């Protein structure tokens, strides 16, 4: 870790020379030309060594040294090198030694003497904990007590979480942000730092007080992380000052990492562990749902499963510095560990229904093995009712019958390029309802639910298509009005007889009907109409997208795992067939409902890139922006949401 040295010297020429020499050794040097500026720099925190001239303007070096030693740790034990041209003699050196000064240099001093003093002071200094490390340790050990920051700010921690504070800096903060005026304070003076008096006096509403308190506390802690300020912790029963303004520490630490805080030491992390292999710990699953990751961060985590070293993982990110800071945050919080060889994730050690920050799962097709019998029946409910309504369950296959899979393949091939009459071996001339009913049941009686359980993959999908096609044809021809319209379309010379043109027209009609039902929020009817359209035109990406959306919004599907899988499969298929804005937008809303705002925003932006006027995506981005604004103002409904 780079040593930060404060050089308190009013001789500009000497200060420039010493600064140049120290920086050539790799140290970070801050300068102060008077005692007041030096004290302010020390109170800001992050100083590892003080080189002090005893004769400083404003506040003498002697007085500054005395104030340092009366301060709480770590200032109290800060290594100090005295540099003086006035206070010469053994008696001054002994006096300085009583104040903890190990090196006492009288001007002029040699380069070698100065170098020896710097090295010995750094070596003898106790290792200083970074402020970010202190916060992390308190959080992970679930300690309660009071954290004292520079400037007199006291932060109360309960089980490791900042929950409230008292600070003389809060009123100046409100003045600078325009929430209070000087005239207000003159007319309604404050008594100490009791924040609740602001509401009692009518200067701020209670909601405003909570909002500004949380913003101030977050800002103050982030500043301390960024500048690695000095702080001390007292483990005792903390004093609670209302109102409570909890700040979720994991979210705060992630915000600090995103801000590129220099004290996260990403370069040192890569140098120390770049050749090691990162993997998730059990703690990852406990903390990952407490904050929202950005899409780039989720995509970076996806690479953990590929056996990359830490260096290779960071290099794969779109922004190397940001990727390193993010991984450093995960390691600091104990969510990721580094091993000498690739290792699998340790997994959650507790029941977890959902992990919000996970990649988008691309589903090729629904896995029938994950579907229950009830889910399967739900998907083809109308067709199954027609199949078994009068005949009951079909009898088991006899040994002489052909395999059911072959039967499905045969029926699927037989319905291709046929109009609804031809499917049942009828014509408009010899049609009658008795023949239709007999033909329908003769073709569907073998499609019993238990036989569906024998199918898998593409064969299952084809069986569903066959049943759906039979049902569409039967419903159309058995309805007098629908049959008349169907006959009119068949006789229209512009359409042609049957075949794909007929199916295409039917599909367009059903698709438009489904969209109208969605606008009416009649999702049951929408799903039925769009399923018919999808059966006729399974390669149309827009139909697949709207069918997925109707299934997702249908309340009767809310508890069906198979329905959820089918939605994801249809949206993936839609995007594979042709990138349409609606598919991205619908997938964005599904992710948003799961609490995965980062990925949802990415999907909405893809939709708007294809169609800037896509209303569903516009609504989604507005909602995310509103959520972020609410979070920024501190009006969370749930602290750890």
Image (cartoon, grey):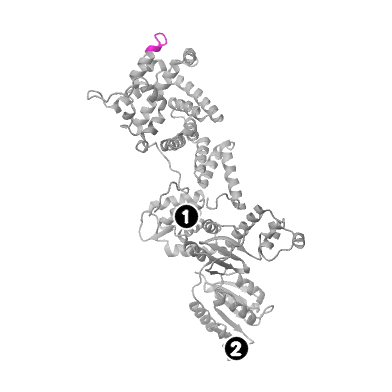
Side of 368 relative to 25 (left or right): left
Q: Residue furthest left?
A: 399
Helix, strand or loop under label 1 = helix
- Quarter occupied by residue 147: bottom right
Going 62% across and 64% down the picture, which residue do you hit?
A: 166
Main SS of residues in magenta: loop
Above/below status of 607 relative to 426: below
Q: Assess disc 2: are there few (<14), some (14-19) or many (≥20) residues with their C-alpha within 10 Å of its C-alpha.
A: few
Helix, strand or loop under label 2 = helix
Q: Using the image as rendered, state which of residue 565 and residue 307 is in the foreground.
A: 565
Q: Which percent across, then down, holds residue 176?
A: 70, 60
Q: Assess disc 1: are there few (<14), some (14-19) or many (≥20) residues with their C-alpha within 10 Å of its C-alpha.
A: some
Q: Which percent across, then down, holds residue 540?
A: 46, 29
Side of 299 relative to 49 (left or right): left
Mark number displayed over residue 233: none
Above/below status of 482 relative to 130: above
Region of the chain picked out in magenta, as a range: 426-434
Residue that carries the numbered disc 2 in the rendered image: 92
Above/below status of 27 relative to 247: below
Q: Which percent across, then down, holds residue 485?
A: 49, 15
Residue that carries the numbered disc 1 in the rendered image: 287
Is tag 2's residue or tag 1's residue first in the polypeptide sequence? 2
| Residue 614 appears in the figure | no
Q: How many marks?
A: 2
Going 53% across and 81% down the picture, which residue do you hit?
A: 117
Above/below status of 269 relative to 439: below
Front disc: 2 or 1: 1
Q: Using the image as rendered, state which of residue 634 and residue 503 is in the foreground.
A: 634
């Amino acid at each position: 870790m780079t040593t930060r040295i404060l050089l308190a010297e009013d001789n500009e020429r000497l200060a420039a020379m010493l600064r140049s020499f120290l920086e050539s050794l790799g140290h970070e040097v801050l300068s102060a030309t008077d005692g007041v500026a030096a004290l302010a720099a020390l109170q800001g925190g992050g100083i590892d060594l003080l080189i002090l001239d005893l004769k400083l303007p404003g506040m003498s070096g002697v007085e500054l040294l005395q104030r340092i030693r009366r301060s709480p740790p770590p200032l109290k034990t800060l290594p100090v090198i005295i540099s003086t041209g006035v206070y010469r003699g053994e008696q001054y050196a002994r006096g300085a030694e009583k104040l903890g000064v190990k090196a006492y240099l009288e001007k002029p001093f040699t380069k070698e003497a100065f170098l020896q003093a710097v090295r010995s002071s750094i070596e003898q200094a106790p290792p200083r904990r970074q402020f970010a490390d202190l916060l992390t340790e308190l959080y992970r050990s679930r300690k309660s007590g009071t954290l004292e920051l520079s400037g007199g700010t006291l932060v109360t921690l309960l089980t490791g979480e900042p929950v409230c504070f008292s600070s003389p800096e809060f009123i100046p903060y409100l003045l600078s942000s325009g929430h209070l005026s000087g005239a207000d304070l003159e007319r309604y003076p404050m008594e100490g730092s009791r924040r609740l008096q602001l509401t009692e006096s009518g200067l701020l509403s209670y909601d405003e007080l909570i909002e500004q308190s949380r913003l101030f506390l977050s800002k103050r802690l982030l500043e301390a992380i960024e500048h690695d300020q000095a702080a001390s912790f007292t483990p005792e029963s903390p004093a609670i000052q209302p109102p409570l303004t909890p700040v979720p520490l994991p979210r705060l630490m992630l915000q600090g990492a995103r801000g590129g805080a220099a004290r996260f030491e990403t370069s040192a992390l890569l140098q120390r562990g770049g050749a090691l292999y990162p993997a998730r710990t059990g703690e990852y699953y406990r903390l990952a749902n407490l904050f929202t990751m950005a899409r780039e961060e989720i995509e970076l985590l996806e690479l953990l499963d590929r056996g990359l070293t830490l260096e290779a993982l960071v290099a794969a990110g779109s922004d190397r510095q940001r990727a390193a800071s993010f991984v450093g945050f995960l390691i600091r919080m104990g969510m990721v560990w580094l091993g000498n060889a690739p290792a699998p994730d340790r997994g959650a050690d507790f029941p977890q229904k959902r992990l919000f920050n996970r990649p988008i799962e691309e589903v090729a097709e629904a896995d029938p093995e994950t579907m229950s019998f009830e889910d399967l029946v739900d998907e083809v409910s109308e067709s199954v009712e027609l199949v078994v309504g009068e005949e009951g369950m079909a009898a088991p296959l006899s040994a002489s019958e052909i395999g059911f899979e072959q039967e499905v393949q045969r029926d699927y091939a037989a319905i291709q390029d046929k109009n609804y009459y031809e499917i049942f071996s009828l014509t408009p001339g010899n049609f009658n309802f008795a023949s239709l009913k007999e033909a329908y049941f003769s073709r569907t009686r073998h499609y019993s639910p238990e036989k569906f359980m024998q199918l898998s993959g593409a064969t299952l999908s084809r069986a569903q298509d066959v049943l759906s096609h039979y049902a569409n044809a039967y419903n159309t021809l058995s309805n007098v009005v629908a049959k008349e319209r169907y006959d009119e379309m068949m006789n229209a010379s512009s359409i042609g007889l049957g075949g794909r043109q007929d199916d295409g027209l039917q599909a367009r009609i059903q698709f438009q009907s489904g969209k109208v039902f969605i606008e009416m929020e009649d999702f049951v009817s929408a799903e039925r109409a769009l399923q018919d359209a999808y059966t006729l035109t399974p390669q149309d990406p827009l139909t697949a997208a709207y069918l997925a959306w109707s299934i997702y919004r249908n309340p009767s599907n809310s508890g069906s795992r198979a329905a959820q899988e089918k939605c994801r499969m249809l949206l993936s298929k839609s995007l594979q067939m042709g990138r349409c804005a609606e598919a991205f937008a619908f997938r964005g809303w599904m992710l948003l409902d799961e609490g995965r705002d980062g990925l949802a925003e990415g999907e909405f932006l893809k939709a708007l890139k294809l169609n800037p006027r896509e209303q569903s995506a516009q609504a989604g981005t507005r909602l995310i922006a509103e959520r972020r604004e609410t979070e920024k103002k501190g009006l969370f409904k749930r602290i750890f949401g």
